[in-house]
Image (cartoon, rainbow, N blue to C red):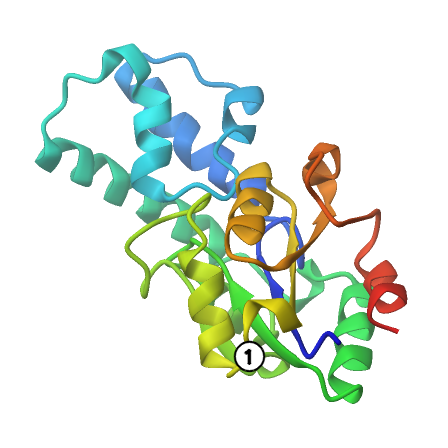
Amino acid sequence: MIKGIIFDLDGVLLSTDEYHYMAWKSIADKLGIYFDKQINNKLRGVSRMDSLEIILGKNNSFSVTEKEMLAEEKNELYRTYLAELKPSAVEKSVRETLDKIRALDIKTAIGSSSKNTRYILEKTDLTHYFNAISDGNNITKSKPDPEVFLKAAEYIGLPPSECIVVEDAHAGIDAAKAGGFTAVAIGDARTHSQADYKINELKELLKIIA
């Protein structure tokens, strides 16, 4: 029986992909490194520092300190864009689905690699939907390591076997399966062969937990 649902944030409940792209593009352009949306798509579910490593690629001659400065610069740009976020960034059907899940007395949590998770939830008025938040501030390993989901399950007091993870990234599905969770794929993750369920819209999740 499913007693808990752990949601990735970006790409599942709303999308700030364009903000990530704009911020990383700015950094890449400054460094003279080619960067497009196809490369940006590879960064889904990946931590900030790991994303920078992917972007740098063969241009990886920077010191640890320089990389940290670049990552922080990217985050400052991203947060500038996030300041524009409003509750309207979340589709009505997503809120309705979350309302119905809460009415079923199913525990809910966020499992996101982003250190901006709480800020995004506050800006979009989503915080009250979740019993717990596990994000980039409380983990040492990013997806595909299952740490972020395992901590989320721990925070809501449930074993992975009783939880669903909803993810839009391949790395997220890998993490869910590695942690022993039931993996529900949405968006790009629907092409992942190991997903237990594949949905086109979040509201389809209600059929799985019914």
Location of residue 95 (image quadrant)? bottom right
The vertical placement of 103 against 39, above or below, is below
Nearest the eye: 140 or 174: 174
The vertical placement of 100 against 179, above or below, is below
Q: Answer whether residue 134 is visible to the viewer in this image.
A: no
Quarter holding the N terminus is bottom right
Nearest the eye: 198 or 20: 198
Q: Residue 33: where, in percent of width, then height?
A: 34, 13
- In this rendering, position of residue 201 left or right of residue 15: right
- In this rendering, position of residue 9 left or right of residue 138: right
Judge the density around disc 1: few (<14), some (14-19), many (≥20) Cα neighbours within 10 Å: some
Q: Which residue is mark 1?
A: 158
The vertical placement of 182 against 173, above or below, is below
Quarter holding the C terminus is bottom right
Q: Which residue is drawn at the image coordinates 30% and 27% (left, top)?
A: 53
Q: Residue 60: where, in percent of width, then height?
A: 21, 18
Q: Which residue is drawn at the image coordinates 46% and 43% (left, top)?
A: 144
Q: Residue 181: where, in percent of width, then height?
A: 60, 60
Q: Which residue is drawn at the image coordinates 59% and 37% (left, top)?
A: 170
- Say which amino acid is labelled 1: Leu
Q: Which residue is drawn at the image coordinates 90% and 65% (left, top)?
A: 207
Q: Answer whether residue 125 is visible to the viewer in this image.
A: yes
